[in-house]
Amino acid sequence: MLNTEPTGLRYDDMYESLIAAHRGLTQEQSHLVNARLVLLLSNHISDLGVLTQAFEIARQGVACERPEPSTSQP
């Protein structure tokens, strides 16, 4: 079960560390850092059920930029 309750983590400090990890990077480099971070933390969590919950919650409220390909022929 994914823990979404507040913890003792100092969120402001965590956010500052995250921002510092991206400082000076291009957008592409920043995306690569985020992808590596997801993989590193996923490895640490090591629970597919928890990860799947996290992925679903993270996607909620984020609009899809590209429409899904149409399966109908004109």
Image: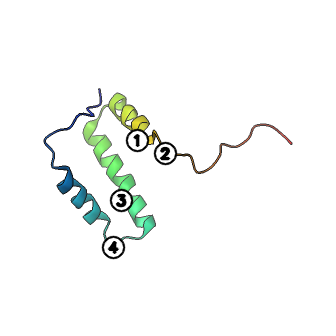
The secondary structure type at the circle numbered 3 is helix
Question: Which is nearer the N-term, disc 3 or disc 1?
Answer: 3
**Residue 40 rendering spot, x and y as whole percentages:** 30, 48
Give how far apart the Cα atoms at labels 1 and 4 are: 25 Å
| Residue at the spot of label 2 | 62
Q: Nearer the viewer, mark 3 or mark 2?
A: 2
Give how far apart the Cα atoms at labels 2 and 4 are: 26 Å
Residues packed near mark 4 inside 10 Å, few (<14), some (14 to 19) or many (20 plus)? few
The secondary structure type at the circle numbered 1 is helix
Q: Residue furthest right?
A: 74
**In the visual, does 19 lie left or right of 30?**
left
Q: Are marks 1 and 4 in contact (CB under 8 Å)?
A: no
Question: Which is nearer the N-term, disc 3 or disc 2?
Answer: 3
Residues packed near mark 1 inside 10 Å, few (<14), some (14 to 19) or many (20 plus)? few
Q: Nearer the viewer, mark 1 or mark 4?
A: 1
Give how far apart the Cα atoms at labels 1 and 2 are: 8 Å
Give, as a three-letter code, the residue at label 4: Gly
Give how far apart the Cα atoms at labels 3 and 1 are: 17 Å
Give, as a three-letter code, the residue at label 2: Val
| Residue at the spot of label 3 | 33
| Mark number displayed over residue 27 | none
| Mark number displayed over residue 24 | 4
The secondary structure type at the circle numbered 4 is loop
Q: Which of marks 3 and 1 is in front?
A: 1
Front residue of 61 and 39: 61
| Residue at the spot of label 1 | 58
**In the visual, does 60 lie left or right of 40?**
right
Give, as a three-letter code, the residue at label 1: Ala
**Residue 67 rendering spot, x and y as whole percentages:** 65, 46
| Residue occupying image coordinates x 37% and y 70% | 25
Q: Which of marks 2 and 4 is in front?
A: 2
| Residue occupying image coordinates x 15% and y 49% | 10
